[in-house]
Image (cartoon, rainbow, N blue to C red):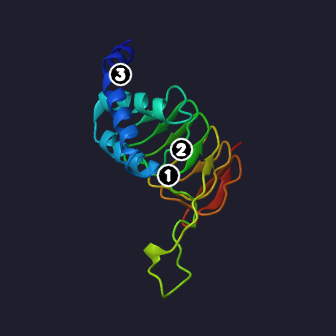
Amino acid sequence: MIRASLAALLAPWAFAVEARYRLLRAFLADDRAFEICSEALARKAGLTGIVLRRLYYSRVLSRCGSGCTFSHGVILTKASATFGNNVALGIGCVVSAADFGSDIVVGPGALFLSGRGQHGFERRDVPMCEQPGQFRTIRIGSDCWIGAGAIVTDDVGEGAIVAAGAVVIEPVPPYCIVGGNPAKIIGKRP
């Protein structure tokens, strides 16, 4: 009841942020305009911020299921990110190009990067910041638990658990538990 009332009160604010995003797209690359608005929304604390982010992302993303929670400090950097139902991102998460299933819990400070090849470094005569990289959408299967501070650069299979602080650089098979840097299988779910 309180969330529904708050959502009704915040709808004009979400609409204003959406309008800002659409205006910025006329002058900036789509992802840059999206990230600017995401950064601004990330600073809104408490239930107001959670509801505002949910309203905004449900309007501008191609898929943002019901019951998603984007905690304080969550920043989405790519407009191509998608979310199923009941995805809960903890405080300070950063999400690039990623496709999330449903029923996913993510601890604070987790990073979801667009693959391992984002930055080119093959040439020594060209600064790395000027070399092209390859971005790809990573997939996070449904019913996953991603621990605090994990860094995910590859797909995570359905039902998998990624331990806190793990660095995922290879695909995680379904229902496996991984940990470490680089992440290795340390167990399987029953």
Q: Nearer the viewer, residue 181 or 171?
A: 171
Task: Say whether disc 3 or disc 2 marks the residue closer to the N-terminus.
Answer: 3
In contact (CB < 8 Å): disc 1 and disc 3: no
In contact (CB < 8 Å): disc 1 and disc 2: yes
Q: CA distance from mark 1 to mark 3?
A: 25 Å
Which amino acid type is marked by label 1?
Ser
Quadrant location of the N terminus in the rendered image: top left
Q: Residues within 10 Å of mark 2 (few under 14, many from 20)?
A: many
Residue lying at the far front of the rendered structure: 26
| Residue 49 image position (x, y, % from top left) | 32, 32
Residue pointed to by mark 3: 11
| Residue 60 image position (x, y, % from top left) | 47, 34
In the rendered structure, find residue 81 and report the number of the disc placed on it: 2
Which amino acid type is marked by label 3?
Ala
Task: Say whether disc 1 or disc 2 marks the residue closer to the N-terminus.
Answer: 2
Left or right placement of residue 189 versus residue 111 in this view? right
Q: CA distance from mark 1 to mark 2?
A: 7 Å
| Residue 93 image position (x, y, % from top left) | 42, 48
Residue pointed to by mark 1: 96
Q: Dot 1 lies on which element?
A: loop
